[in-house]
């Protein structure tokens, strides 16, 4: 995984420690939901000390950390203030619109695209964002399914980027996956609830990386990225696997979901390798 695995213990360890501290301080109910903020803490630590990446957004990749932080704040606000579902959807949609528009136009309040291709990208990105976040909102009610999904998507994006020669995006994706793994490790033990922080913050960071790989100058294969869209629907197959008694099923289900999700991730990586440019 990008050569040396050891540095990725930075986001893993930071996220694990932050999640444990939040769970301990805020209690079993609120702490379980707020622990999702640990992912962006771990990712930010990796961004600063491992990736040595810039904090000023000047392209799609450098904007990912801002999407992750903004999404985590927005998700935390939704977890703290219980809104009517219609207002929560509007709130999330405004966040999505801002993220996509900033990537397409180059700034949060930037000039609109000056060609048809730019508007098509805007519409496609918007469709994928809304679709994935809606899917994660459904999965978050099924225990660790949403967390496993964003973890596997980050792994998939890292592999596609690595196979395509997009090393910077790959390193960022692996760092994000390591942060997800830190929270997932604690969630596996304590059965933490998944809140909107993971949906908007974690899902937003994943989608930000996907946009960086889908940009016109990227060498990544769009076909490989399309295969990753199968990952959020792997839960249907995982649920049908014989996992034994109910007591064992809750512990084994995340492993089963990881195994099933690994199939489209592997296909995406192979396709990215085969279609990689010179």
Image (cartoon, grey):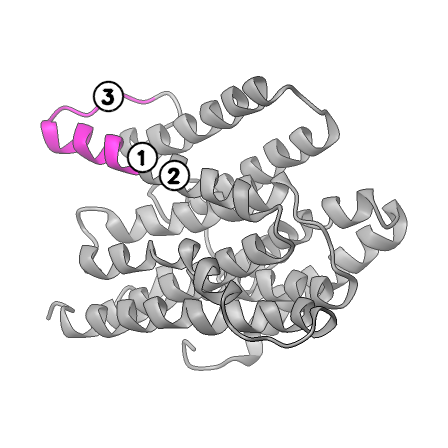
Decide if residue 248 is on the left or right side of residue 105: right
Residue at left 21%, top 74%? 273
- Horizontal and vertical percent for residue 235? 48, 59
Q: CA distance from mark 3 to mark 2?
A: 23 Å
Dot 1 falls on a residue whose secondary structure is helix
Q: 87 or 66: nearer the eye?
A: 87
Q: CA distance from mark 1 to mark 2?
A: 6 Å
- Horizontal and vertical percent for residue 3? 42, 81
| Segment colored magenta | 110-125
Which numbered marker is on residue 127? 1
What is the magenta segment's predominant secondary structure?
helix
Dot 2 falls on a residue whose secondary structure is helix
Residue at left 43%, top 70%? 260
- Horizontal and vertical percent for residue 196? 62, 39
Q: Which residue is mark 3?
A: 112
Q: Are marks 3 and 2 in contact (CB under 8 Å)?
A: no
- Horizontal and vertical percent for residue 35? 73, 50
> Which circle's residue, 3 or 1, is located before the other in the chain?
3
Tell me if I can see residue 248 in this picture: yes
Residue at left 81%, top 51%? 22
Q: Are marks 3 and 1 in contact (CB under 8 Å)?
A: no
Residue at left 59%, top 23%? 85
Dot 2 crowding, Cα within 10 Å, few <14, some 14–19, many 20+: few
> Which circle's residue, 3 or 2, is located before the other in the chain?
3
Dot 3 crowding, Cα within 10 Å, few <14, some 14–19, many 20+: some
Q: CA distance from mark 3 to mark 1?
A: 18 Å
Decide if residue 156 is on the left or right side of residue 205: left
Q: Which residue is mark 2?
A: 131
65 is within the stretch colored magenta: no
Dot 3 falls on a residue whose secondary structure is loop
């Amino acid at each position: 995984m990008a050569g040396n695995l050891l540095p990725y213990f930075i986001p893993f360890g930071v996220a694990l420690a932050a999640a444990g501290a939040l769970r301990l301080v805020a209690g079993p109910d609120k702490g379980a939901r707020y622990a999702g903020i640990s992912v962006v803490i771990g990712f930010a630590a990796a961004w600063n000390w491992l990736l040595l990446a810039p904090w000023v957004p000047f392209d799609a990749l450098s904007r990912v950390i801002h999407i992750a932080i903004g999404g985590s704040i927005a998700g935390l606000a939704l977890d703290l203030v219980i809104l009517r579902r219609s207002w929560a959807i509007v709130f999330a949609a405004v966040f999505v619109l801002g993220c996509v528009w900033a990537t397409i136009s180059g700034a949060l309040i930037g000039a609109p695209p000056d060609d048809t291709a730019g508007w098509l990208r805007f519409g496609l990105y918007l469709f994928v964002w809304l679709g994935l976040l809606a899917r994660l909102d459904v999965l978050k009610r099924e225990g660790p399914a949403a967390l496993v999904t964003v973890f596997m998507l980050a792994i998939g994006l890292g592999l596609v980027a690595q196979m395509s020669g997009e090393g910077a995006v790959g390193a960022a994706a692996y760092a994000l996956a390591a942060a997800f793994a830190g929270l997932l490790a604690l969630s596996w033990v304590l059965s933490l609830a998944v809140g909107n922080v993971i949906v908007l913050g974690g899902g937003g960071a994943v989608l930000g990386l996907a946009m960086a790989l889908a940009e016109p100058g990227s060498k990544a294969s769009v076909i490989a990225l399309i295969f990753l869209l199968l990952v959020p629907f792997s839960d249907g197959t995982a649920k049908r696997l014989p996992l034994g008694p109910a007591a064992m099923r809750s512990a084994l289900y995340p492993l089963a979901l990881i195994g099933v999700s690994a199939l489209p991730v592997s296909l995406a990586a192979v396709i990215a390798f085969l279609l990689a440019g010179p």
